[in-house]
């Protein structure tokens, strides 16, 4: 008798995916569902209300992206975080900054080697860019009117 042991990792799956693929299950499908991602089996632990599959970061690096580990450890390019309410955004941003500074072992006088951007600040940047574009278009229109006026004279 040959016994093959397989490691099955836990993950969250989008509820619509779970319903579509596992709607024929008579019992709770989460207890029976194993889905493979790049050949790695994941046991579905919970449903989420998005179109994603959620995997713990440590599991992701260990199984799906081992080449993303650098000499300084795991390389993370972006993390999306949602605050509980609009009023909590600034305090969440400050708290995230403090945690990242601590995790990156930055001293008080050292600059952040990361950036924390809220949707509010992104909207402000987009507004500034639109204002600049509006100014450039107004300048081009002004020059066109001036050239047209000179041409008529």
Image (spheres, grey):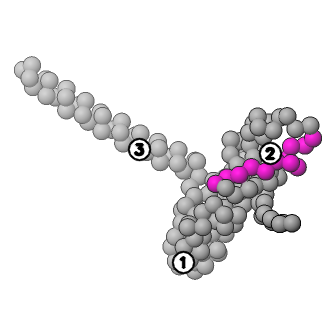
In the figure, 150 relative to 60: above or below? Answer: above
Q: Residue at x 75, y 46 (%)?
A: 13
Callout in the foreground (3, 2): 2
Quadrant (top left/top right/bottom left/bottom right) for the C terminus: top left
Magenta-tinted stretch: 27-38
Nearer-the-camera pick, 126 or 24: 24
Q: Which residue is labeled 3 in the image?
A: 129
Are the residues flagged by discs 1 and 3 in contact, CB closer than 8 Å? no
Question: Which is nearer the N-term, disc 3 or disc 2?
Answer: 2
Q: Residue at x 78, y 40 (%)?
A: 18
Nearer-the-camera pick, 79 or 2: 2
Residue 139 belongs to the span the image colors magenta: no
Q: Residue at x 57, y 70 (%)?
A: 69
Q: Which residue is labeled 2 in the image?
A: 47
| Mark 2: secondary structure | strand
Question: Which is nearer the N-term, disc 2 or disc 1?
Answer: 2
Q: Which residue is labeled 1 in the image?
A: 71
Nearer-the-camera pick, 140 or 28: 28
Q: Is residue 96 visible?
A: no
Residue 93 rendering spot, x and y as whole percentages: 64, 59
Question: Which is nearer the N-term, disc 1 or disc 3?
Answer: 1
Q: Residue at x 72, y 60 (%)?
A: 56
Quadrant (top left/top right/bottom left/bottom right) for the N terminus: bottom right
Q: Is residue 132 visible?
A: yes
Residue 32 belongs to the span the image colors magenta: yes
Q: Residues within 10 Å of mark 3 (few under 14, many from 20)?
A: few
């Amino acid at each position: 008798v040959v016994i093959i042991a397989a490691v099955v990792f836990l993950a969250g799956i989008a509820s619509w995916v779970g319903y579509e693929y596992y709607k024929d299950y008579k019992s709770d499908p989460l207890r029976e569902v194993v889905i493979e991602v790049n050949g790695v089996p994941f046991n579905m632990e919970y449903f989420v209300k998005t179109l994603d599959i959620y995997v713990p970061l440590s599991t992701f690096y260990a199984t799906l992206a081992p080449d993303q580990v650098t000499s300084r450890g795991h390389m993370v390019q972006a993390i999306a975080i949602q605050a509980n309410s609009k009023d909590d955004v600034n305090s969440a941003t400050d708290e995230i900054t403090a945690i990242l500074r601590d995790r990156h072992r930055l001293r008080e006088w050292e600059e952040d080697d990361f950036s924390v951007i809220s949707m509010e600040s992104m909207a402000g940047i987009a507004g500034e860019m639109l204002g600049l574009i509006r100014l450039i278009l107004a300048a081009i229109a002004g020059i066109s009117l001036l050239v047209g006026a000179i041409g008529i004279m």
